[in-house]
Amino acid sequence: MPGYKSIDRIRTVTASSFDRLVLKGEGPIVVEFMSYGCAHCGVMEPELQQVAEMVESTEKIFRVNIAVDRDLADLYEIQGTPTLIMFLNGAVVGRDEGPSPEVSNILALVKQPYE
Amino acid sequence: MQIKEQSAPILLFNDECGVCRSIANWVKKQVQATSHGTSLVVRPIGQDPEELQALNQGLNIWDAYATIHLLMPDGSMKLGGEAVAEVLRHLSSTRWFTWTFAINLFGIRPFQAILNLAYTILADVRPVFGCESCGTPSPWVRPIRWMVKWVASLFGKSHHASPSPHFSSLPGSGRRPQAHQI
């Protein structure tokens, strides 16, 4: 899985930083609920890193590791991984579970709610 | 980042996968029985990328979950079938036949090649044994998985069929994946 090892463009948020970085964050924010043991998340990782680079001027992309932050997973009714939830000024404006791991598809998913 | 010094090889296993956990438990028992746990360390990969890199700077957590890794005391890593062979060399119950993995015929190590193939097959069939987090089954495994599910359904064991092939349902989750814009 090349392409994600050099720079990690997706910052990990935890239960303690979620409120400050996501709910009180300004503008479009995408949160990937994932786990490192989820092979689908591993397949999507390089594509999501590319998308994060493409949208970094307009959107922030974070990850929540649900194996660590189970309370956040429960709060957002996460049924599996990867799940993308799109926030705008703290409110949920979009959601996708198990997106097809192509850059074009993920890019469309993370842009559509904000158009 | 400070690298932790190690005196014994460390076997990393995926503790979210039942098959991997069973094999790791077997290895642990063998190690405990023969060397009181000193010849090999067996530990789950876990969820902390930085903690893993403290063991070996070249180790990426996604790679660790993708294939079996054995971290050697000299800083090198053995992967896949090579890692399995090295683990077997460290167990007294299996050490006796591991010399075969070194046999080299015209540049090919036939027994190591068989072991590599066996590892690949085992890794591929993990989804058949219910490891959803292990990813999309290889094409050759899909009919087997479908048959296992069909047989299970005959005995009243329902399987949650995910409409998205790129989604790992959490245990106990009954709701289907959804894609909607609010």
Image (cartoon, coloured by chain):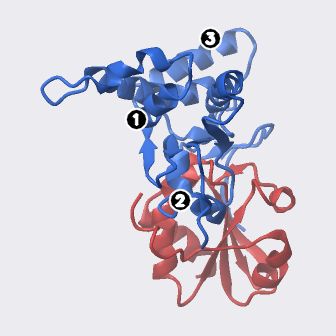
Q: Is residue B104 left or right of residue A46?
A: left
Q: Secondary structure at mark 2?
A: loop
In the rendering, which numbered label is found on residue B56?
A: 2
Q: Which residue is mark 1?
A: B82
- Name the amino acid, label 2: Asn
- Name the amino acid, label 1: Glu
Given residues B101 and A115, the one toward you in this image is B101
Tell me the distance, in whole angstroms, between the alpha carbons under discs 1 and 2. 18 Å
Tell me the distance, in whole angstroms, between the alpha carbons under discs 1 and 3. 35 Å
In the rendering, which numbered label is found on residue B146?
A: none
Image position, residue B164 (x, y; %):
57, 44
**Is residue B162 visible to the viewer in this orientation of the structure?**
no
Give the mark nearest the N terminus, 1 or 2.
2
Q: What's the residue at 53%, 90% (across, down)?
A: A57
Q: What's the residue at 55%, 43% (across, down)?
A: B9
Q: Are marks 1 and 3 on the same chain?
A: yes
Image position, residue A6 (x, y; %):
45, 73
Which chain is home to disc 3?
A: B
Label the blue chain with its letter: B
Q: Nearer the viewer, mark 3 or mark 2?
A: 2
**Is residue B51 visible to the viewer in this orientation of the structure?**
yes
Q: Secondary structure at mark 1?
A: helix
Q: Which residue is mark 3?
A: B151
